[in-house]
Amino acid sequence: MTRRELLLSALSAATLSDIASAQQHAQSAKESDAAFRYLATADAREIEALAAQIIPSDGTPGAKEAGCIHFIDRALETFDREKREIYRTGLAAAQKKRAELFPQSQTLAGLESSQAIELIRGIEQTEFFKLLRTHTIMGFLATPAWGGNQGMVGWAHIGLEHKMAFQPPFGYYDGAAK
């Protein structure tokens, strides 16, 4: 049996189906901003505004340009579906905090950057914000097939070159042997 045959036999049909579904979702996310499978467009806009404060676009692409919201949508649809309630209640609590801090505002996305930062300071210890931060970072650095890191901007930001194979630099093991 070849390694390829062994690998294919190890993968279940459900796993292959999930991978194909993720790739299809990523493609549709690239084609249209309205391609959300779990999140409502209005909620996605609000969550994206918070994510844009976590990894801002100041001189380099941030969470918005990387399409982290599409990764979050994909996560809530698939592997983190049990965390949907955290997002639902957390977003409602963030809206309540926004109305308390800035009664004249209508949406999280409509807040100025300084206001959004003040709001985040008020919710940063919540389970919702901690999960949002985790999902934003994951979406910024994950493979583009999962919806985030569009254009590989996250990888470019950390200096990762997209290659088929990686190897440590010459002499890497020599230094550890001493």
Image: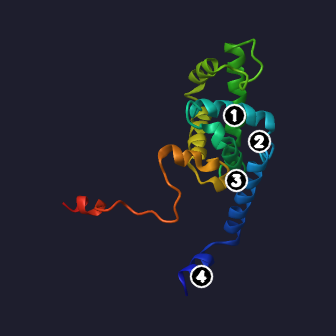
Q: Is residue 65 above or below residue 178?
A: above
Separation (CA) of disc 3 from disc 1:
18 Å
Q: Which residue is mark 2?
A: 39
Q: Is residue 6 above or below residue 129?
A: below
| Horizontal and vertical percent position of residue 31 | 78, 49
Nearer-N-terminus badge (3/4): 4
Q: Residue at x 60, y 75 (%)?
A: 10
Q: Secondary structure at mark 2?
A: loop
Question: Is disc 1 in contact with disc 2, using a CB cutoff of under 8 Å?
Answer: yes
Q: Which residue is mark 4?
A: 5
Nearer-N-terminus badge (3/1): 1
Separation (CA) of disc 1 from disc 2:
10 Å
| Horizontal and vertical percent position of residue 127 | 59, 34
- Which is more toward the observer, 60 or 79? 60
Residue 131 in which image quadrant: top right
Separation (CA) of disc 1 from disc 4:
42 Å
Residue flagged by tag 4: what amino acid is it?
Glu
Image quadrant where one finds the C terminus: bottom left
Q: Secondary structure at mark 4?
A: helix
Q: Which residue is mark 3?
A: 78
Q: Which residue is mark 1?
A: 47
Residue flagged by tag 2: what amino acid is it?
Leu
